[in-house]
Amino acid sequence: MPVDVLTGLQWGDEGKGKIVDILSESVDAVARFSGGGNAGHTVSVGPDLSFVLHHLPTGLLRENVEGLIGSGCVIDPGALLGEMGELAGAGLPVDRGRLLISAGAHLVHPVYRVVEKWDEARRGDSSIGTTARGIGPCYAEKYWRRGIRLEDAAFEQGLRHKAREQLEYHLDAMGGSAPSGSDLSALRDATGRFVEASLALLDYAGDVSLRIADILESGGSVLAEGAQGALLDPDHGTYPYVTGGSCTAGGACSGLGIGPRSIGQVVGVMKAYSTRVGAGPFPTELPNETGDRIRERGGEYGATTGRPRRCGWLDGVLARYAVRLNGCSWVALTLLDVLSGFEKLRVCNRYELDPEASAGIFERGARMALHRPFYRELDGWEEEIRGMTSWDALPRKARDYVLYLEELIGVPIGLVSTGPGRSEIIRRDV
Ligand code: GDP
Ligand code: IMO
Ligand code: MG
């Protein structure tokens, strides 16, 4: 059996958690290959029960599914233990046999959050609007080859030494802006807790690449769960307004230690409109009443930070780009129910490029704002469609909208989500 990969096609928060939850009904393991505490994947498992998973693979919400966290991920040990505690409290204990974390995964030292806050402040008007979870500094340290990996916890004294070294290094780098007094002693205490939490996680450390090979060898199946979205990818997104981890399907290979020939289907998740949290270009943004209406209908507030998400029309040009980058086999369309009641809907289907741009739409991430989006206007539909499970029962205008998106992106839309709940889904033959 191959590894199927699921990724976000926009700026994150496409509803990946909900779709992974549905697909994980029939897999043996779900593996996160990128990101960390910046992700917030929501699964609504019952009328009054939903979970938001940050580090943990969403598949763990299904009792028989094993969770894997690859070396492409960055882990805040205390936060991860907290998440595990939450699941255990809800009757879903994450025992050693159910979770394996790559020994090569990097750990988020508490000083990274401080450095990130300092750096964001220094950037002023050009700040990225990060999730403030220490993600950027952690990936930076990884590539500076100074980072702390879970495997370091196997040598307690070495870990303590590295944790202290990281702290001192960054305090030095921040110079006069470094925390002092009670802030500094709080940071030293947090560093102590970081070491204890890392030691506690050691029980879960192992070789994720090998585990996946074993599962496949014995005929089992694995779903790789992406975090963030293609347009936040450091290589292919709207740089510099991006995250640190790899967000496209290719990242599953490096982040899990599997070869490209192990990949089966690639599923892209796309919401029926666009949202973005944080700064950066967003050509189809609606900073007006229509955008507010989408935000309120869709409950578009960050699952990790609670920040209001910027809302806009679906960008078909960027969606087609993301489908190509990921090599999608098919797409799951989410949040279609949010668009009920709009008289007209718009979808960007081409750009008039800024004449000075020499390398197309992504010449420089921030420069995208200079290109002009053009729209196709489609009729909306009045009826509420929340919870619908049948394609034929959808209003014709809603079906036309989906079929138009399918034509634009060039791959089939195999799932249409009509609500946050597990059963609120339309399955189509693709
Ligand atoms: P992720 O990061 O891609 O997993 O997405 P988030 O969990 O951050 O945000 C998606 C939000 O939309 C969550 O609150 C989900 O419960 C919700 N959601 C997912 N699919 C649907 C849908 O089809 N309709 C509605 N109304 N909400 C949905
Ligand atoms: P999920 O997996 C939406 C955004 C931040 C910021 C930029 C960099 O839930 O879809 P970072 O803290 O990663 O350095 O922030 O990336 N961002 C997300 N936006 N969903 C996410 O994850 C995100 N993870 C990071 O808002 O603009
Ligand atoms: Mg999210």
Image: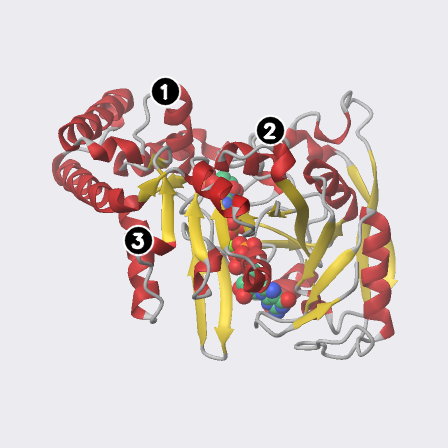
Residue 412 vertical placement versus 339 (above, below):
above
Question: Which mark is drawn over residue 145?
Answer: 1
| Numbered disc 3: secondary structure | helix
**Sequence-wise first label, 3 or 2:** 3
Give the class, few, some or many, for how many residues have Cα within 10 Å of label 3's Cα (few <14, many ≥20): few
Residue 379 seen in render: no
Real-space CA distance between mark 2 and mark 1, rounded to the nearest whole angstrom: 20 Å
Question: Which mark is drawn over residue 235?
Answer: 2
Circle 3 residue: 96
The one nearer the camera, 275 or 51, is 51
Residue 383, quarter of picture: bottom right
Three-letter amino acid code at the position of disc 1: Arg
**Sequence-wise first label, 1 or 3:** 3
Query: Residue 31 appears at what percent x and percent y?
Result: 49, 48
Real-space CA distance between mark 3 and mark 2, rounded to the nearest whole angstrom: 35 Å
Three-letter amino acid code at the position of disc 2: Asp
Give the class, few, some or many, for how many residues have Cα within 10 Å of label 1's Cα (few <14, many ≥20): few
Please state which of the two labelled residues, at mark 2 or mark 1, is closer to the viewer.
1
Q: Are marks 3 and 2 in contact (CB under 8 Å)?
A: no
